[in-house]
Amino acid sequence: MLSKPLLTLHEVSALLKMKESTVRAWIRDGDLRAIKMGRDWRVSEDDLEAFLHSHANRPPEDAD
């Protein structure tokens, strides 16, 4: 069973305050990992976090 629900493109774009077309382009270009379900795409929260971390301008600071 999934530990976290999958996000729709609308939900991803709302979270990031980006256009859905931008999110679709990231998926099309292979930058953002997504799952095709019928005619729609879904993105896991883990994949979205990995995408954001990979596009950050510096690594996250240690919590120590």
Image (cartoon, rainbow, N blue to C red):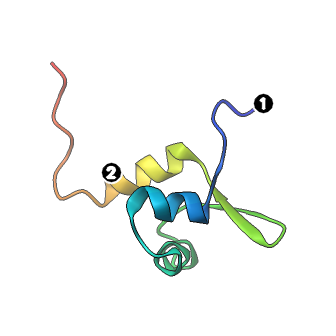
Q: In this view, does 37 lie above or below 21?
A: above
Dot 1 corresponds to which residue?
1
Residue drawn at (55%, 72%) of the image: 27
Q: How crowded is mark 1: few (under 14 residues within 10 Å), some or many (20 or more)?
A: few
| Residue 61 screen position, x and y as percent | 16, 35
Vertical relation: 22 (above or below) 5: below
Amino acid type, mark 2: His
- The amino acid at mark 1 is Met
Quarter location, residue 3 = top right
27 sits left or right of 18 in the view: right
Q: How many labels does the image show?
A: 2
Give the SS element for disc 2: helix
Tell me if 55 is positioned left or right of 50 in this view.
left
In the rendered image, the quadrant that contains the N terminus is: top right
Percent coordinates x, y for residue 6 in the rendering: 66, 47
Q: What is the secondary structure assignment of the residue under circle 1?
A: loop
Of the image marks 1 and 2, the number of the one nearer the N terminus: 1
Q: Which residue is drawn at 74% across and 68% down?
A: 40
Q: Measured from the top left, where is residue 62 in percent x and y?
A: 17, 29
Residue on which the image places disc 2: 53
Left or right: residue 45 versus residue 18 is right
- Spatial distance from mark 1 to mark 2, Cα to Cα? 26 Å
Q: Quadrant of the C terminus?
A: top left
